[in-house]
Amino acid sequence: MARVTINRDYLLGVEGNGKLRYIPDEKLRGFCIKVSPTGSVAFYYRWDKPRTADGKRQQGSKFIANWPGTEPGKARDMAAKFAATVEHSTDDNRTILAKRDQRAKEADRAKVVPTLGEYLADTYGPFVKAERATGARIIADIQKTFSSWLDRPLDQITIKEISDWKTAELSRVLRPAANGLPEKRVKPATMNGKLNKLKGLFSHAFENIVISTNPAENVTKTDEGPERVRWLHWDEAQRLHQALDERETQLWVERERINTDPRHGSVSATHATFADCVKPAVLFALNSGLRRKEQLSLLWTDIDMYGREITVRTSKTKRSRVVPINDELFAVLTAWRAQCFGGSVYPLLVFPSTTGDAQREVKAFDDVRRAAKIHNFRWHDLRHTFATWAVAGGAPLDVVSRWLGHSRIEQTMRYAHRSPEFAARAINAVSLGHVAANGVALKAA
């Protein structure tokens, strides 16, 4: 029978003629459709096997899938994959031996389910490092948290064991009660983060048919209570600026004292705008909303001072974005850039360490925060402050969402809920006075 291109259009025209037929494909030799006398269609792969010892021909036939449950393109790919594993009459001895060896290895792999450690190292680890910016940290956290399970096959870790770990983790005491301070235990959010990492690994194994059931699927997360979103109020922001300025003054005074001491040589110039990177780094975070890792891995080539834009390339979501530069940040970056490029060595990073490498954190920030008498406040809360102020200032939520690099606008909505200015502006927008003042014509329904 003449070969045809087996595609959707061709299959839609196939009808039964009262006879069983095989119709070969012109794209992949051996791939064909089997048409029943009534017109039902199935995909097959047919091939000539190596001849028997006495020279007789052997023919093989392998069912691939049914139509229309499987599209022809996918069925052709499945047939090609199968064809690469079976022996054909045209294969030489080396090819036949290689195929047999490959089938034996695949059979051995099918019999043995990898351990948690093996799957993490060989399969899930490379996957998560390629897909997530925090992949290396996820791998390290799984290895540390579930170290006692690393030698256990994935299919032998049960839902009861994961649930028992969850209970034990929530009961784990980090610091006993002492000196009037209450006992400190693992927070639900911390436990949920560890559980989510394990869930991700088991979901990946289940989706790739490494295990037949997912033991972590029905282990629920623990309620974390009200979501924590802390931002600076105006008086706290003023105290933060004042603490940064006072720290700068103290550093310059100390360096001037050392510079004028005859026992020491000159340790630093006194004409620079900033004593170190702390003040520009804090003001950058406050005016850009970048995550800490995004900011500390930022390169000078990512900053367009003429277009007043920052391109974030190292993102948690692995999607680049552009953040505009406001007036305060422009002034800070202008001075900081002039200071960084004032010597003979030009840095690549905007906020490098003293050795020129990327920093993991701005360690002096806690000292500045305490000097400003700002409590219950972390570096990441500078990002919350940026978002809350942007929403309160009238920036549309979808725009703020893009600036922050959120994957869903629901993540940005929390800042609107916490902004009294946003609520007041929104409710006043529906008043008759507001409508009349903005020249909006009211028409009867």
Image: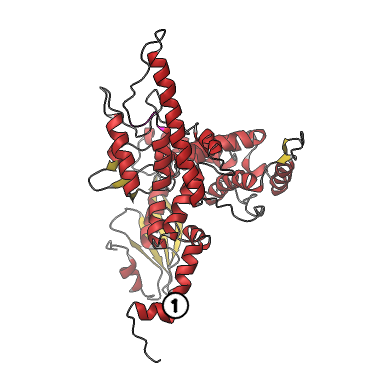
| Nearer-the-camera pick, 238 or 133 | 238
Judge left or right: residue 27 versus residue 402.
Answer: left
- Residue 163 or 245: which is nearer the viewer? 245
* In the displayed structure image, the side of residue 320 where residue 163 appears, left or right: right
**Residue that sits furthest to the bottom in the current view:** 444
Which secondary structure dominates the residues rendered in magenta? loop
x and y percentages locating residue 420 in the rendered image? 51, 63
Residue 125 drawn at (x, y percent): 50, 38
Q: State the residue at coordinates (26%, 27%).
A: 342
Circle 1 Cα neighbour tier, 10 Å, few/some/many (<14 / 14–19 / ≥20) = few
Q: Nearer the viewer, residue 247 or 118?
A: 247
Which of the image's four quarters has the N terminus? bottom left
Q: Quadrant of the C terminus?
A: bottom left
Residue 86 appearing in the image:
no
In the image as oriented, which residue stretches furthest toward the top? 263
Q: Quadrant of residue 376?
A: top right
Residue placed at 73% from the left, 39% from the top? 172
The quarter holding residue 354 reads top left
> Which residue is painted at 52% across and 62% down in the image?
417
The relative height of residue 441 versus residue 198 in the rendered view (above or below) is below
Residue at image point 46% right, 31% down: 247
In magenta segment, residue 332:
no
> Which element type, helix, strand or loop, lies under badge 1?
loop
From what the image shows, is residue 35 above or below residue 372? below
Q: Answer left or right for 304 relative to 157.
A: left
Highlighted range, magenta? 273-277
Is residue 309 left or right of 85 when viewed as pictured? Answer: left
291 is higher (above) or lower (below) than 21? above
The amino acid beneath tag 1 is: Val
Q: Position of residue 407 (x, y in %)?
A: 44, 55
Q: Which residue is mark 1?
A: 430
